[in-house]
Image (cartoon, helix red, strand yellow):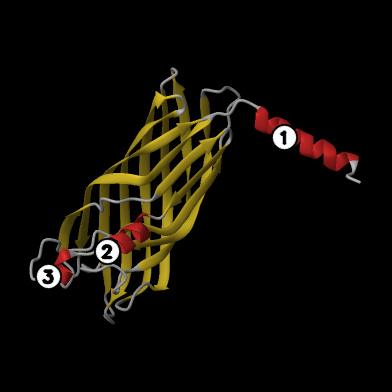
Amino acid sequence: MISKKLLITLLALFGLGLKAQVGLNCQFVPGLQLGAVTVKSDNSKIGEYKAAAGLPVFMLDRLKNKWYAQLDMNGLYYSVTQYNKSQRSKGDSTKYAKTEGGLCAGRIGYGFGKSETMRVGPNLNIGYMMSNINGNKRSFEGMPMYWNFGGGVFFYQKIGTKIRAMAKVGYEKYSNKKASSDIATLKGSGTYFEATVAYNIYQKYGVAVMPALYSKKFTYNYNGETTETKTKVKSVVLRIGFTKFF
């Protein structure tokens, strides 16, 4: 027989599930991303370049009641769905692979606030990411990959009955002893800012937009060189996707 304590616990959990929920679930898959990525390196073999941000994205951004979570697989999704035309034809319509984001990176956080209109709290970040910091023309062919660890804070606000918004800011550290075939002992750090605005269209469903700014700094040994290479990556993007209100 089920013990009384277990039964009471199950009933309590079920009761929590019936409570009015706070938050939103933004799905940027299928989704679109517009913007630009700028790379500046002090190594003349890499140089400086700018490319449009990868158009397809794969990101889930969710707050439900107290818990906040995000899954970023933008780098992986771009890499397996896009092929540079310059690699398959004589033309050079795409000069660089537009790979920037997570292979599988995530955040988990907990929000404080008693009302149904506001939450604010900390989050932890961990994952595995990709950045085109060596001028590659094809993803996964020598593309640098690295671990990210960090944290931040998020703020959620319900505005009337149609609009809900979130702001997220944080700091991360990057590292990998062997990031790719020509990049070793990679380390670095970065900051991010994301502002999500969701608008209800029908019942609990609507659209979401996420303007975001990412700034990263990397230091690494390039192609066996003893002198360290320093590279800065700045991404300014706007993501468009779907949302569900809780």
How crowded pointer 2 is (Cα within 10 Å; few <14, some 14-19, many 20+) is rated as: many
**Which comes before the other along the chain, label 1 or label 2?**
1
Q: CA distance from mark 3 to mark 1?
A: 58 Å
Find disc 1 in the rendering and name its residue: 14
* Amino acid, disc 1: Phe
Q: Position of residue 50 (x, y in %)?
A: 17, 56
**Residue positioned 47% across, 59% down in the render:** 127
Q: CA distance from mark 2 to mark 3?
A: 22 Å
SS at circle 2: loop
Frontmost of labels 1 and 2 is: 1
Find disc 2 in the rendering and name its residue: 132
Q: Position of residue 62 (x, y in %)?
A: 49, 40
In the picture shown, does residue 195 fall above or below 237?
above
Q: Position of residue 12 (x, y in %)?
A: 76, 34
**Residue positioned 23% across, 63% down in the render:** 97
How crowded pointer 3 is (Cα within 10 Å; few <14, some 14-19, many 20+) is rated as: few
How crowded pointer 1 is (Cα within 10 Å; few <14, some 14-19, many 20+) is rated as: few
Find disc 3 in the rendering and name its residue: 89
Query: Can residue 148 be seen from the camera position used here?
Result: no
Q: Image quarter for residue 102?
A: bottom left
**Residue positioned 29% across, 45% down in the render:** 32
Left or right, 229 with reference to 7:
left
Q: Image quarter for residue 78?
A: bottom left
